[in-house]
Image: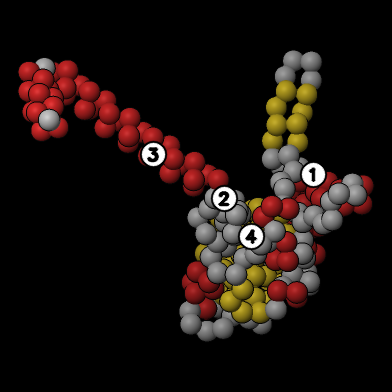
Amino acid sequence: MLLTHIKIAFRTLRKNRLTTSLNIIGLAVGFAVCLFVGLWMQYELSFDRFHADAGRIFRLTNTFKSETESFSQAPCGPAFGAHIPLKISGVTSATRVYEESGRLEVDGKVFQEPRMVVADANFFRFFSFEITSGDPDRFLTEPGNIVLTEKTAMKYFGDENPVGKPMRLDGAHTFTVSGVVKDAPAASQILVRSGAADGFFEKTCRRGMGYKKC
C-alpha cells in the first residue's frame, strides 16, 4: 500500500516537473535561510558570554533628545564611569575603556597599532581575558604599565618573555610590559591588542576628549 502511494507521488511529480522544481527550490532556499539566520543569531547572542560575570556586566549608552530628533550612542563621557558606582547603589563597580591607535616601538621594531585600549586599573578584574603571564592584580596599577596580547607580544618580542621590558608609544611615552593575555575571541566587543594603565587614561581623555578632569 505504501509502495503504491510512493509510486503515485513520483508519477505526479514527474508529470508536473516545473511545479515540482519550483517547490523543491523554494524548500531548499527556505531551509538555507533558516539555517543562516539561526547561525547568525547564535553568533550575535554569544558576544562577550565568555566573561565570568557576563550576566552582571552592562554597557552604558547615551540617549540624546531634542525637539526635532532623538538618537542613542555608545560612547559616554569618562565622568560617567567614575561617578555611577557612587550615585547608584545597584552598581557595584565600573570600568572605563577608551580605544585609540598609536605607534609602538621596541628595539627598532615599529608598528602602528589600530586597536589600543586605555582603561582603568580594574579592567582585567572586570573582564575575564585569559592570563598568560604576569599578575592581573598589578597589570594596570602603575601609569606606565602596558599589557599585550599573545599575538602582539610575539610581534615585538618573539619567543622572549616580554614582562618587565620597555616599549615606546608614539616616541613620547615609555611603558613597561606588566602582563600578557590570550587574544580576545572573535565574539568579543573589546578586541584589545594592548592595554595601557589608568594613570595614562586621565592624560588621554584630557587630550583626546577635551575634559579637564576624568
Q: CA distance from mark 4 to mark 1?
A: 24 Å
Kind of residue indicated by mark 3 = Phe
Q: Residue at x 55, y 45 (%)?
A: 45
Q: Secondary structure at mark 2?
A: loop
Q: Residues within 10 Å of mark 3 (few under 14, many from 20)?
A: few
**How was the colour assigned to the protein in this rendering?**
secondary structure
Quadrant of the rendered structure where residue 112 is? bottom right
Is tag 2's residue or tag 3's residue first in the polypeptide sequence? 3
Residue under pointer 2: 47
Between circles 4 and 1, the one closer to the viewer is 4
> Residues under labels 1 and 2: Cα distance?
24 Å
Residue 205: image location, x then y, percent = 77, 52
Q: CA distance from mark 2 to mark 3?
A: 17 Å
Q: Is residue 92 left or right of residue 111?
A: right
Instruction: Tell me the element at label 3.
Output: helix
Identify which residue is drawn at 84% across, 56% down: 92
Residue 125 is left or right of residue 30, and the answer is right
The three-letter amino acid code for the residue at tag 4 is His
Quadrant of the rendered image containing residue 38: top left
Assess whether mark 3 and mark 2 are in contact (beta carbons under 8 angstroms): no
Instruction: Evaluate if marks 2 and 4 touch, with contact meaning CB atoms under 8 Å apart.
Output: no
- Residue annotated with mark 3: 36
- Could you tell me how far apart the alpha carbons at marks 3 and 1 are, in whole angstroms? 38 Å
Q: Are marks 3 and 1 in contact (CB under 8 Å)?
A: no
**Quadrant occupied by the N terminus:** top left
Quadrant for residue 97, please give it.
bottom right
Q: Position of residue 35 (x, y in %)?
A: 37, 39
Q: Which residue is mark 4?
A: 51
Residue shown at the point (77%, 61%) measured from the top left:
120
User: Which three-letter amino acid code belongs to the residue tagged 1?
Assistant: Gly
Q: Earlier in the sequence, mark 4 or mark 1?
A: 4
